[in-house]
């Protein structure tokens, strides 16, 4: 039986990936924080085993699995990461721990016989890039906060560590994603919530040119990157296309509250506002065949339908 480990398994992207792995015939070890309030988000399936384990104990994963009669796995997807929002992004103690836990995750993966390890990086690794520049695996990185610095260090250190064990290593740098189980602080989900409540949502002028990818497409990108991608490569993950942010917001409105007005220009751009954000997925496509299957409108329809069922019962 094919088996994969997914850490940080209560998050949107990990949930989408878990669902995909099950469809692909994998048993999934879903590693979550003990007592997580989001434990119920993990897909319920006879092919999914939930393991409660803090990241500071990730090195004990092989022993925990062995005690449950699980001795090996093939793939390891590492999403777990603390300090992803607000002031915690610049909490250096948290970010340093994240790097150490990532390296320890590689060692745990090696002990259970994994042949390949994927780490989840971020667009924050790049820092600010000139408008019009697509982000590739070779784009120079100059992160401007502890979160981005930590992700960049984790990507590089886990690559070196994986090589020691002869383990394939792939690092993905994730741009803007959306979908079911997304955090309520995001532009997409906060907009859906506000509009489904019949309220007017306020935004900037929406002139930013951004790249959004639906979580199900992102999950396919991760799976293909690790199973078909090239060892040692960094793959930005996005749609590879940009649209004005205003168009994305209007698409959300058209699905969630067609009659609502939108307060474009009621919010000022914040200092250092990123006005252009796009992934160069040419290498990912060449190496793995990945192409997004969902339009933003299709993904938003599914996301709004999910929100209605989950919160407007």
Image (tube, helix red, strand yellow):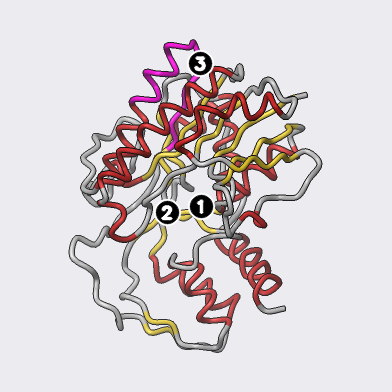
Residue at 44% across, 27% down: 104
Q: Position of residue 146 (x, y in %)?
A: 25, 46
Q: Position of residue 195 (x, y in %)?
A: 53, 81
Distance from the alpha carbon under mark 1 to that under mark 2:
7 Å
On screen, residue 313 versus residue 219, left or right, reads: right
Instruction: Determine the residue located farthest toward the left in the rendered image.
Output: 271
Q: Nearer the viewer, mark 2 or mark 3?
A: 3
On screen, residue 274 versus residue 176, left or right, reads: left
Distance from the alpha carbon under mark 1 to that under mark 3:
28 Å
Q: Position of residue 78 (x, y in %)?
A: 50, 36
Tag 1: Cα neighbours inside 10 Å, few (<14), some, or many (≥20)?
A: many
Specify start and end residues of the magenta stretch as a single range.
Answer: 157-172
Label pair 1/2, CB-CB below 8 angstroms: yes
Instruction: Kindly indicate the quadrant of the structure image that contains residue 14.
Output: top right
Closer-to-camera residue (311/49): 49
- Helix or strand or loop: what does disc 2 sit on? loop
> Label 1: which residue?
213
- Who comes first in sequence, dot 1 or dot 3? 3
Closer-to-camera residue (137/97): 97
> Label 2: which residue?
211
Label pair 1/3, CB-CB below 8 angstroms: no
Tag 2: Cα neighbours inside 10 Å, few (<14), some, or many (≥20)?
A: many
Closer-to-camera residue (213/196): 196
> Label 3: which residue?
167
């Amino acid at each position: 039986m094919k088996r994969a480990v997914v850490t940080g398994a209560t998050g949107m992207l990990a949930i989408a990936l878990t669902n995909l792995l099950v469809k692909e015939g994998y048993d999934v070890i879903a590693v979550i924080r003990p007592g997580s309030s989001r434990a119920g988000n993990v897909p319920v399936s006879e092919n999914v085993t939930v393991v409660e384990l803090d990241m500071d104990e990730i090195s004990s994963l092989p022993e925990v699995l062995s005690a449950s009669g699980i001795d090996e796995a093939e793939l390891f997807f590492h999403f777990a990461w603390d300090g992803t929002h607000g002031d915690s992004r610049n909490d250096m103690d948290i970010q340093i721990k994240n790097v150490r836990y990532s390296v320890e995750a590689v060692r745990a993966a090696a002990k259970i016989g994994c042949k390949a390890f994927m780490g989840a990086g971020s667009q924050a690794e790049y820092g600010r890039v000139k408008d019009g520049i697509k982000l590739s695996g070779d784009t120079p990185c100059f992160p401007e906060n502890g979160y981005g610095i930590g992700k960049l260090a984790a990507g590089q250190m886990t690559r070196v560590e994986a090589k020691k064990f002869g383990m394939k290593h792939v690092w993905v740098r994730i741009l803007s994603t959306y979908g079911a189980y997304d955090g309520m602080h995001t532009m997409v989900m906060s907009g859906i919530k506000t509009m489904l409540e019949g309220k007017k949502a306020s935004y900037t002028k929406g002139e930013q040119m951004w790249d959004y990818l639906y979580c199900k497409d992102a999950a396919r990108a991760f799976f293909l990157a690790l199973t078909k991608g090239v060892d040692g490569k960094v793959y930005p993950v996005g749609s590879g296309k940009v649209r004005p942010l205003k168009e994305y917001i209007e698409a959300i409105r058209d699905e969630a509250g067609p009659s609502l007005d939108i307060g474009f220009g009621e919010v000022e751009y914040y200092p250092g506002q990123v006005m252009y954000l796009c992934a160069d997925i040419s290498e990912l496509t060449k190496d793995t065949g990945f192409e997004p299957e969902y339009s933003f409108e299709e993904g938003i329809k599914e996301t709004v339908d999910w929100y209605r069922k989950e919160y407007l019962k």
